[in-house]
Image (tube, rainbow, N blue to C red):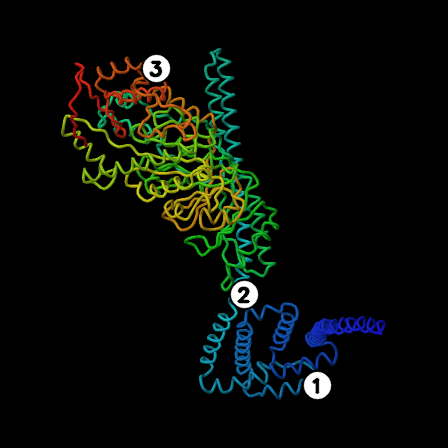
C-alpha cells in the first residue's frame, strides 16, 4: 500500500506538468506558422506582380492586360501601390495602425488619377470603347492601345462628364487630391520635415565652418600685413640710425590682434557695475546721512566700497570646439528617437557654460511622456553622465534636452559682476549665475523675500552663499545692510568676523543661534511698533519719513538698516533646537519682509524633518544644487531635476514669481577673493556690534559660571565710567575703540555701567542714554522722546 501511494503521488505532478506545457507550445507554434504564412504570401504575390510589371512571357503579359482591363494605363501605378501596401502590412505593422487615414487618402488619390487618365483617353479616342480595346489586347497577347482609366475609369468618368462637364471633372479631381493630401500629410510631412531639417542643419553648420575659416584666414592675413609693416618701419629706422622707441608699440599691436580672435560664446553687455556699486551709495551718504553717533559718523564719512579690481579675473573659455560635438549629438538624438518610432526634429541648440540645451519639436500626435521616459536611453546613446529633459519648455511648444558639455567653462565672479544688468537700484539685487544663453541672472532679495539653498557636499552651495555675501559687501555701506550669520560648521563664515556689517560675531553654537534668531524676531516686533507710531507700512516708508524729518529739523535721527540673516547649515540647528529655530524662521518668513529683514537658509540635507512644510510655505524662493535623489529635489523645488545636475555650481533657481526652475551656472569665487574684499573693509572700518542682538552664553556654560555683579568691577570700569559721562554717549563699539578691548569685555563693562545706573538699557541700534550729567548729578528718571 505505501508503495502504491508513492507511485500515484509521483505520477500526478508529471501529468500536470505535461498538460501545463501544451498551451504555450501551441501558441508559439501558431504565431510561428502565422508569420510564415504572411511572409510566404508576400513573396508569392511579389513574384506574380514582378512578372506582370516586367511582362515576362505570355503569363506576364496576360496578368498585365488583366490589370489594364480594370484600371487601364494606370496598371503599373496600381501594381506598385498594391506592392507597397503589402510590404507595409507585413514588415511595418504599426504604420497603418498609427496612420489610419493614410489608406483612404491613397485610394482617393488613385481615384483622381483614374478620372484624369480617362479624360485624356476621351480626348484622344472619343468614339472608341476602352473595354473593347482591352479585350482585343488580351486576346492578341499584346500591349498596343492607350486605355485611359480602363473599366473603372469608364464607369465613373461617363456619369461625371454628363453631370459636371470635363472642366467640372478636373475641379472635382483637384478637390479629391487636396483631401487625399490632408489625410496622408501627418505621416508624410513629418518624415519629410525631419529629412529637410537634418540637411538644412548640416548645410548651415558647413557654411558656418567655412565663414569662420574665412574670418580666421583674414585675421591671419591682417596680422601678417601688420608684422610686415612693422618690420619695414624697423628697417627704415635702422637705416636712418634713429633710436627705437616703437618696440613697446609693436608688442601692444600684437596683443590687440590676439584679442580680436572670435569666440563662440553669447555676448552679454557690460553694465557699469563699478558706478552702481561704488558711486551711488557714497553720493547718498554725502547728501543725507548726518552722523547721529560717534562711531557711525566716522564709518559713513570715510568708508569706501570695495572695487572690482580686488577680484581675480578668470579668462573666458572659448567653446568653439563644442560645435562639432553639438552636430554629432543632433544626429544621435534624431536617430535614437527615430529608433523608438518617435517622429521629432531638433529645432535649435544653445551652448551653455556646462550643458547644451537641444530644443526638439515633436510631430503631431506624439506624447510628451514617451520622450521623458527615454532619459536613460538617451544618456546611453550619447555616452553622457546624465540627461535632463524639460518638457515642455515654458512659453514654447518644444521639449528641451540638456546634455553635459565635454568641457565645463568656468564662470568667474568678476565676469558675473561686470556683466550683470540690474533692473532696479535695490541694494539687495544681486547676480546669481549665468544662464544657458549667456545672460547673467540676477535676483532681488527684497522681492524673494527669503531664499532656501540646498545641495549635497561639493555641489557649490557654500560658494554661492559666499558670492551673495560678497556682492552685498561690494554694494552696501555698513549703515545700510547688516548681517547676522550662523555657522555651526565654524569654518565657512568665520572669515567675515570683525567686519562692520555684522550685528554680532558669527554665531557657531547652535543654542546661541536659536536665541540669536529670537533676538531678530524681537527686532522685527520693535520695528513694527516704530512703523505704527510713524504711520507707515514698511521700512522704505519709515526711512523716507526719517529723511524728510531730518531735512526739516536740526535733530538727526538714524534710518533703519536692512538685516540679512544667513544660516549656513540649517540641519545642525534643527537637530539641537528644532522647535525654537522653526518657530523663529516661520515668524520671520511671515512678517519680516516689510520690516527689512531677509533670510538665506542653506542646508546639505534637504529632508522633510529639516525643511518642514511650514518653512517651505514661508520661504517660496529656492535654489537647488546637485542632490542624490529625486525625493530631495522635490523637497527643495517641488519637482524633479536637481538629481540630474552636474555639481560645481550647476543649479536650478526657482524664484517666487516663476512656476518653473531655471538652470544656471554659478560663479566661482576663490577664498583669496573673499579675503581681499574682507581685508579691504577691515582696514578702513572696525566692527560695530549691536549688543541688543547678543544671545549671551550657552545654557551648558551659563550654569557652570558665575555672573559678575556690578560691585566686582573691571579694572577699566572707572575709566569707562569717566569716558561715557564726559562724552554723554555710550555704546559698546565706543568702549572697544577707546579702551582697546574686545567685544566681550566691552559688553561686560557696559552691563556693569547699566547696573550702576550710569547708562540706560539697550534699545536696538540707537546708543544708550547716559543717566549722569557731566557735573556728576543723576537725572531724575527723565524719558526722552524717540522717533
Circle 2 SS class? helix
Label 2 Cα crowd, 10 Å radius (few <14 / some 14-19 / many 20+): few
Visible residue check, residue 627: yes
In the image, residue 460 above or below residue 152: above
Q: Position of residue 101 (x, y in %)?
A: 53, 72
Q: Nearer the viewer, mark 1 or mark 3?
A: 3
Query: Dot 3 lies on which element?
Result: loop
Locate residue 119 relative to residue 282 in the image: left or right. right
Residue 46 visible in the snapshot: no
Q: Is residue 13 above or below residue 248?
A: below
Quadrant housing residue 772: top left
State how far apart marks 2 and 3 are (Cα): 86 Å
415 and 706: which one is in front?
706
Which quadrant does the N terminus fall into? bottom right
Q: Position of residue 319 (x, y in %)?
A: 52, 38
- Pointer 2 residue: 188
Amino acid at each position: 500500500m505505501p508503495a502504491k501511494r508513492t507511485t500515484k503521488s509521483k505520477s500526478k505532478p508529471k501529468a500536470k506538468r505535461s498538460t501545463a506545457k501544451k498551451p504555450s507550445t501551441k501558441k508559439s507554434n501558431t504565431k510561428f506558422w502565422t508569420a510564415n504564412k504572411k511572409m510566404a504570401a508576400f513573396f508569392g504575390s511579389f513574384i506574380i506582380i514582378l512578372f506582370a510589371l516586367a511582362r515576362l512571357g505570355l503569363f506576364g503579359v496576360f496578368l498585365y492586360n488583366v490589370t489594364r482591363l480594370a484600371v487601364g494605363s494606370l496598371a503599373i501605378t496600381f501594381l506598385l501601390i498594391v506592392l507597397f501596401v503589402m510590404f507595409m502590412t507585413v514588415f511595418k505593422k504599426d504604420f497603418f495602425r498609427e496612420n489610419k487615414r493614410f489608406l483612404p487618402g491613397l485610394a482617393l488619390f488613385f481615384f483622381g488619377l483614374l478620372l484624369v487618365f480617362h479624360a485624356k483617353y476621351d480626348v484622344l479616342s472619343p468614339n472608341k470603347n476602352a473595354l473593347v480595346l482591352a479585350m482585343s489586347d488580351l486576346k492578341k497577347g499584346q500591349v498596343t492601345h492607350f486605355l485611359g482609366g480602363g473599366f473603372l475609369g469608364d464607369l465613373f468618368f461617363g456619369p461625371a462628364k454628363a453631370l459636371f462637364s470635363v472642366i467640372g471633372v478636373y475641379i472635382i479631381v483637384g478637390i479629391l487630391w487636396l483631401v487625399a493630401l490632408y489625410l496622408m500629410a501627418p505621416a508624410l510631412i513629418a518624415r519629410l520635415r525631419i529629412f529637410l531639417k537634418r540637411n538644412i542643419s548640416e548645410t548651415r553648420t558647413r557654411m558656418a565652418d567655412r565663414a569662420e575659416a574665412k574670418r580666421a584666414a583674414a585675421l591671419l592675413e591682417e596680422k601678417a600685413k601688420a608684422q610686415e609693416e612693422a618690420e619695414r618701419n624697423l628697417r627704415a629706422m635702422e637705416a636712418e640710425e634713429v633710436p627705437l622707441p616703437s618696440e613697446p608699440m609693436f608688442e601692444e599691436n600684437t596683443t590687440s590682434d590676439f584679442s580680436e580672435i572670435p569666440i563662440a560664446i553669447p555676448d552679454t553687455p557690460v553694465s557699469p557695475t563699478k558706478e552702481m556699486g561704488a558711486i551711488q551709495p557714497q553720493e547718498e551718504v554725502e547728501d543725507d546721512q548726518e552722523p547721529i553717533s560717534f562711531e557711525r559718523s566716522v564709518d559713513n564719512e570715510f568708508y569706501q566700497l570695495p572695487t572690482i579690481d580686488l577680484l581675480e579675473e578668470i579668462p573666458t573659455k572659448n567653446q568653439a570646439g563644442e560645435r562639432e560635438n553639438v552636430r554629432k549629438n543632433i544626429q544621435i538624438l534624431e536617430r535614437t528617437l527615430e529608433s523608438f518610432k518617435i517622429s521629432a526634429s531638433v529645432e535649435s541648440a544653445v551652448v551653455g557654460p556646462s550643458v547644451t540645451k537641444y530644443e526638439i519639436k515633436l510631430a503631431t500626435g506624439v506624447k510628451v511622456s514617451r520622450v521623458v521616459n527615454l532619459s536613460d536611453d538617451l544618456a546611453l546613446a550619447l555616452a553622457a553622465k546624465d540627461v535632463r529633459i524639460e518638457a515642455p519648455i515654458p512659453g514654447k511648444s518644444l521639449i528641451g534636452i540638456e546634455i553635459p558639455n565635454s568641457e565645463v567653462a568656468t564662470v568667474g565672479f568678476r565676469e558675473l559682476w561686470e556683466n550683470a544688468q540690474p533692473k532696479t537700484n535695490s541694494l539687495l539685487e544681486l547676480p546669481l549665475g549665468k544662464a544657458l544663453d549667456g545672460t547673467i541672472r540676477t535676483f532681488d532679495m527684497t522681492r524673494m523675500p527669503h531664499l532656501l539653498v540646498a545641495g549635497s557636499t561639493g555641489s557649490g552651495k557654500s560658494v554661492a552663499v559666499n558670492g551673495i555675501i560678497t556682492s552685498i559687501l561690494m554694494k552696501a555701506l555698513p549703515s545700510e545692510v547688516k548681517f547676522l550669520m550662523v555657522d555651526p560648521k565654524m569654518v565657512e563664515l568665520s572669515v567675515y568676523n570683525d567686519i562692520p556689517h555684522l550685528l554680532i560675531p558669527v554665531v557657531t553654537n547652535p543654542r546661541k543661534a536659536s536665541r540669536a534668531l529670537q533676538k531678530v524676531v524681537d527686532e522685527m516686533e520693535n520695528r513694527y511698533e516704530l512703523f505704527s507710531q510713524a504711520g507707515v507700512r514698511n521700512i522704505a516708508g519709515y526711512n523716507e519719513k526719517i529723511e524728510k524729518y531730518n531735512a526739516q529739523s536740526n535733530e538727526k535721527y538714524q534710518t533703519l538698516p536692512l538685516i540679512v540673516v544667513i544660516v549656513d547649515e540649517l540641519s545642525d540647528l534643527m537637530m539641537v533646537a528644532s522647535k525654537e529655530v522653526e518657530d523663529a524662521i516661520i515668524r520671520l518668513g511671515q512678517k519680516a519682509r516689510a520690516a527689512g529683514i531677509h533670510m538665506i537658509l542653506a542646508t546639505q540635507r534637504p529632508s522633510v524633518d529639516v525643511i518642514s512644510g511650514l518653512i517651505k510655505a514661508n520661504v517660496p524662493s529656492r535654489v537647488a544644487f546637485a542632490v542624490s535623489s529625486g525625493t530631495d529635489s522635490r523637497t527643495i523645488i517641488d519637482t524633479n531635476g536637481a538629481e540630474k545636475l552636474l555639481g560645481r555650481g550647476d543649479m536650478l533657481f526657482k524664484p517666487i514669481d516663476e512656476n518653473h526652475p531655471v538652470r544656471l551656472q554659478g560663479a566661482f569665487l576663490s577664498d583669496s577673493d573673499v579675503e581681499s574684499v574682507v581685508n579691504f573693509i577691515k582696514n578702513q572700518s572696525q566692527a560695530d556690534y549691536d549688543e541688543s542682538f547678543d544671545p549671551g552664553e550657552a545654557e551648558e556654560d551659563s550654569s557652570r559660571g558665575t555672573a559678575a555683579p556690578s560691585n566686582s568691577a573691571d579694572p577699566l570700569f572707572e575709566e569707562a565710567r569717566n569716558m561715557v559721562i564726559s562724552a554723554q554717549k555710550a555704546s559698546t563699539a565706543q568702549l572697544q575703540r577707546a579702551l582697546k578691548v574686545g567685544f566681550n569685555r566691552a559688553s561686560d563693562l557696559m552691563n556693569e555701567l547699566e547696573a550702576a545706573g550710569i547708562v540706560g538699557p539697550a534699545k536696538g541700534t540707537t546708543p544708550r542714554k547716559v543717566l549722569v550729567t557731566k557735573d556728576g548729578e543723576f537725572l531724575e528718571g527723565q524719558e526722552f522722546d524717540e522717533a
